Image (cartoon, rainbow, N blue to C red):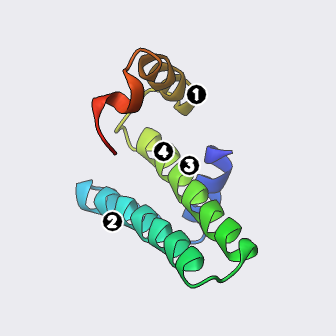
Amino acid sequence: MGDELHEAATSKGFWPDKVDDIFITKQLMMIVSEAVEVMEAIRKDKGKDAVADEMADIIIRTLDLYSGLQEHGYTETTLDEAIAKKTSFNKTRPERHGVKF
């Protein structure tokens, strides 16, 4: 799915030919902005559809970015491998990972 989303984003001009750390940082901040939009949809009671739409945007941007990171050499690990590794590690951590919140 990530590869399909990345291909669509690239074909629509959202990815430049030359990708650098600044571009990647901007893409990360776009994911943050989508998270803010979910919060605002809830805070302003925009409804369940708005919450779902904004959550979808987070997932779309995240999967697109991960595929782009792979394409441009930032990681060689597949997303499935990364999730499996992190999930396995998180199972060994204490409740709430030892923090209050």
Task: Judge left or right: residue 48 versus residue 38.
Answer: right
Q: Whole-Å distance between the Cαs marked 2 and 3? A: 15 Å
* First reached walking from the N terminus: tag 4 or tag 2: 2
Identify the residue under disc 2. Answer: 26
Could you tell me which secondary element the residue under label 3 belongs to?
helix
- At horizontal 54% and vertical 22% (from top left) the residue drawn is 84
Q: Amino acid at mark 1?
A: Asp
Task: Judge left or right: residue 16 versus residue 54.
Answer: left
Identify the residue under disc 1. Answer: 80
Could you tell me which secondary element the residue under label 4 belongs to?
helix
Identify the residue under disc 4. Answer: 66
Observer able to see residue 14: no
Q: Quadrant of the C terminus?
A: top left
* First reached walking from the N terminus: tag 1 or tag 4: 4
Q: Amino acid at mark 2?
A: Lys
- At horizontal 47% and vertical 18% (from top left) the residue drawn is 91
Q: Whole-Å distance between the Cαs marked 3 and 4? A: 5 Å
- At horizontal 37% and vertical 58% (from top left) the residue drawn is 28
Mark identifier at residue 63 = 3
